[in-house]
Amino acid sequence: MKKPIRIAIQQKGRLREGSIAFLQSMGLRCAFENEREYIVPCEGGRVEILCVRNGDIPKYIEFGAADYGIVGENILHEHEQDADVTIAKKLGFGSCRVVIAVPNGSSIRRVSDLQGERIATSYPNTLKKFLMKHRIDASIIEIQGKVEVTPRLGLADAICEIVQTGRTLEENNLIEIEKILNSQVVLIQSPSIMRQSIFDTLL
């Protein structure tokens, strides 16, 4: 029996619903029951969905555990030195941006003011590349989750984090001072695999 095409998507989080809607728009019918499922078969047996942690999707593609992945460009930018994948198509949803923000009332108002400061982030590689580009020497504090509260707790002077509407920044009395990159959801594949017929109309 021919091996099914495997597509990796976010197991849980803001991109899951849009990823499933995209798969359905392709005519795929898969029985998603809960967010704890790991492998979800689709009708007909030609395709199965691999539900994994968002940040791990590029690695699943690179090492052949999945043929395609649906992931945010921000994740690719964070891991671009580690994962050998290519963007097959931009999917037009999940728009966001990675920004640097500071407490309202902070003396930090521009990138140059970050010199010598502490910046908390869940995107350390993205932040490091940005600081190097601007020749800024600052301390990077890697935090997984709730980055926005770190200035209030005295852990950091600024944050580098993903933003959609800006509401979370506002709720934590933070203001954006710099945009590092824009992001949307993309379909990725390993450059070594052959194009699969199910996506011929897209690629």
Image (cartoon, rainbow, N blue to C red):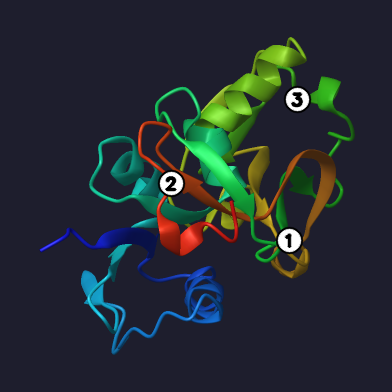
Q: Say few, some or many: other residues with alpha carbon within 10 Å of mark 1 (under 14 / 14 to 19 / 20 or more).
A: many
Tag shown at residue 169: 1
Q: Quadrant of the N terminus?
A: bottom left
* Residue situated furthest top in the rendering: 135
Q: Position of residue 38 (x, y in %)?
A: 21, 69
Q: Position of residue 42 (x, y in %)?
A: 29, 79
Identify the element where label 2 is drawn: loop
Residue drawn at x 68%, y 66% is: 93
Residue 152 in view, yes or no:
no
Identify the element where label 3 is drawn: helix
Q: Which residue is mark 2?
A: 195
Q: Say few, some or many: other residues with alpha carbon within 10 Å of mark 3 (under 14 / 14 to 19 / 20 or more).
A: many
The image quadrant of residue 179 is top right
Q: Nearer the viewer, mark 1 or mark 2?
A: 2
Q: Nearer the viewer, residue 106 or 184?
A: 184
Tag shown at residue 114: 3
Structural distance between the alpha carbons of marks 3 and 2:
45 Å
Structural distance between the alpha carbons of marks 1 and 2:
41 Å
State yes or no: discs 1 and 2 in contact (Cβ < 8 Å).
Answer: no
